[in-house]
Image (cartoon, helix red, strand yellow):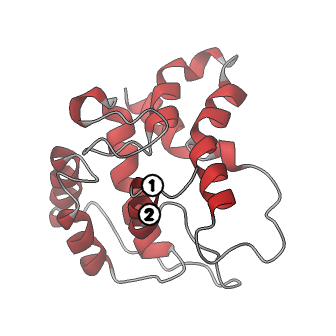
Amino acid sequence: MSEALQFAAALHNVGLIAPPERGEARHLTPDRARRIAEHPTRGVQMLQHIDFLEESRSAILHHHERWDGDGYPQGLAAERIPLLARIVAVADVYVALTWGRDRMPPEQALEIVDARAGTHLDPRCVAALRAAWDRGRIVDRPRPAGPDLPLDHDAPEVSDLMASGVPR
């Protein structure tokens, strides 16, 4: 399982591979929401013939499902979401908060992740992240210098917008 998780974590956004549009949106437009909603399915399609990724594909496909059922691509909820996808989702949100455009300290990011347990994220996976933090298993690494980042599709506010029915 750990190898499948490693591959899923590394490849979960492969379906986003495409040159960004000039002046990539800093807000969620209906066209951008549609492209975001399609990337898990596109990623699985890209990887469908790579046999050793078989166990990783369901995590790649479902990493934007939400615990409350308001995610995509299939609107799965709770335990119907594959475990590896639930793990990737929690890590994805944490990374978006600590490395994203509006980078915040890890402690603040953990509070936001904790607050999303039971709605956006699997409470047990959130508890596992918190336990890893408490044991010192997660370290804060500075984000490399670079240009201002566009809107991060993994940020919690984008998940909320997608769940609220932004046209896909």
- Which element is circle 2 on? helix
Q: Residues within 10 Å of mark 2 (few under 14, many from 20)?
A: few
- Which image quarter is the N terminus in? top left
Q: Which amino acid is tagged 2? A: Leu
CA distance separating discs 2 and 1: 7 Å
Residue 31, how many percent across, how many down?
A: 69, 58
Residue 76, how many percent across, how many down?
A: 34, 33
User: Image point 68% across, 49% down: which residue?
Assistant: 16
Q: Is residue 86 above or below residue 91?
A: above
User: Image point 66% across, 20% down: which residue?
Assistant: 48
User: Relative to residue 149, is residue 58 drawn left or right?
Assistant: left
Q: Nearer the viewer, residue 80 or 127?
A: 80
Q: Is residue 125 above or below residue 96?
A: above
User: Image point 67% across, 42% down: which residue?
Assistant: 15
User: Image point 48% across, 83% down: which residue?
Assistant: 102
Q: Nearer the viewer, residue 3 or 24?
A: 24
Q: Which mark is residue 165?
A: 1
- Which element is circle 1 on? loop
User: Relative to residue 51, is residue 80 drawn left or right?
Assistant: left
Q: Which amino acid is tagged 1? A: Gly
Residue 36, how many percent across, how many down?
A: 60, 52
User: Relative to residue 60, is residue 31 drawn left or right?
Assistant: right
Residue 63, how many percent across, how many down?
A: 44, 42
Q: Count of labels shown?
A: 2
Residue 164: quadrant of the picture: bottom left
The residue singled out by tag 2 in the image is 161
